[in-house]
Amino acid sequence: MFFHFGVNTFTDSERGSGHESPSIFNPERLNASQWMDAAQSAGAQLVILTVKHHDGFCLWPSAYTNFSVASSSWRGGKGDVVAEFVAAARERGLDVGFYLSPWDLHESCYGDTLLYNEFYLAQLRELLTGYGPISEVWLDGAKSPTAVNMSYDFELWFDTIHQLQPGANIFSDAGPDIRWVGNEYGEAGQPCWAMANRSSITIGRSDGQYLMSGESAGTDWLPPECDISIRPGWFWHRNEAPKSLEQLLDVFYKSSARNCLLLLNVPPNSSGLIDESDFQTLERFSSAIDSIFSVNLAANPLSVTASSVRSSSFGPKQILDERMETFWAPMQGESTGWIELDLGKVSKFNALEIREPVNMGQRVMEYHVEAWDSELGWYLVSNGSTIGYRKVDRLEEDQVCAARLVRLLIDTSRGDPLICFFGLYFDMYNLRHLSSI
């Protein structure tokens, strides 16, 4: 979960000028524990704070600027949002990440390549040495076309992050650990490869379609992350409302369900709390996801067979648990194959999930799923390109498949296909009328 918070929260803007008075920052009821309540209600495992946005205002008392919480009215200038954020997250067992914007509209040294890169590096060191273990450092190349032109020393920054926080993943258009998905509406491509070529990506001037899809022959492992806000804007605005449950479920099926991680922004309001409407929406969203995936109709089939099996350790029954360490593998050298499940009875489903053991690489290039009908024979239920860590196919609205026999067919694969999980689910939220079933 992302938390965009800063002077923009108090000026009703999305992009500050860098010349705001620090005194306007005064979230009198700020409660980072309540933010973590929201994160946990949505099932988040990692929380990322915008410690500095493009305006340059710092949510910690940085020694390198006078544009920070130390010059604000909040807590009498003695507060530290970053410290409270980190403490609240650690208390709940949540991993912590920081977004430190490279573009800075406040600092006078911005535009001087040497001085600003040193300034940014100094602030990175403050953040990465003063707040304990950090799991993700999030940065981008976003800036106005009219902004002062200067070069960022990304490789030096990346090296410093890995030196100071060796367990941290670095997010940017080009990784080096996690790549941007190429848009801010929460949609991964089809196909969606975890691989890409870092040398083909320029931070801040990237090909969005390339980032969405990746590349099957990519030389770098750069799994994508989808960022989107629960509201129209990234910062809280009184006149905006959160997305509907239907919209958020659509985002889920286009991000988390396409070999991608969803980074959902939920901005605290000017009092320093997550708005109640956002909180309730998160709870409904989490409840819906839990409801959809609580019952796997393929968990206890009467039988599971396959086109071939490499050995007893890699049999088709290995796809019945969610562990990445257990998987089906066909005979060595076979790039196609199938797995068939006899569910034991006719079951109704409208969503199916497939996973590859990505610790062994992402392999499947094309697949399709069929079901058996006594009159039609085998008929197509769904088809797709890549699978990766997790692929969930949702049938068309109001379409429900009723079948006893279901099979997954791997049509094309980079090397031997490996499948570690297959599940069937009933998504009631994808039905306009329950009577349609």
Image (spheres, grey):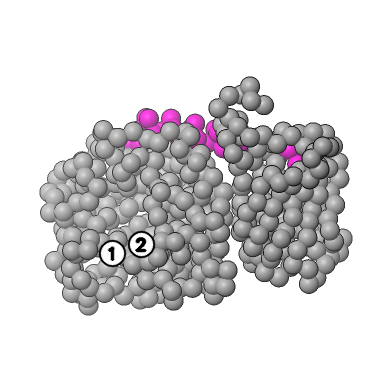
Q: Is residue 274 magenta?
A: yes
SS at badge 2: loop
Q: Amino acid at mark 1?
A: Pro
Tell me where residue 425 appears, x and y as whole percent.
67, 38
Report whether residue 95 is seen.
no
Q: Main secondary structure of the magenta part?
A: helix
Query: As rendered, which of 374 and 58 lies closer to the eye?
Result: 374
Marks 1 and 2, the one that precedes in the sequence: 1
| Mark 1, other Cα within 10 Å: few <14 / some 14–19 / many ≥20 | many
Q: Mark 2: which amino acid?
A: Leu
Q: In the image, is residue 97 part of the stretch drawn in magenta?
A: no
Identify which residue is drawn at 86% across, 45% down: 303
Against 362, residue 197 (above or below) is below
Which circle marks residue 277 in the picture? none
Helix, strand or loop at mark 1 = loop
Asked if residue 364 lies left or right of residue 197, the reply is right
Quadrant location of residue 308? bottom right
Q: Residue at x 42, y 51 (%)?
A: 227
- Residues under numbered marks 1 and 2 in contact, where contact means CB atoms less than 8 Å apart: yes
Q: Which residues are magenta?
A: 273-298
Where residue 183 appears, x then y in whole percent? 40, 55
Residue drawn at x 60%, y 32% as measured from the top left? 398
Q: Callout 2: few (<14), some (14-19), or many (20+) C-alpha neighbours within 10 Å?
A: many
- Residue 43 percent coordinates (x, y): 52, 42
Mark 2 lies on residue: 139
Between residue 250 and residue 264, name the one nearer to us: 250
Disc 1 marks which residue? Answer: 102
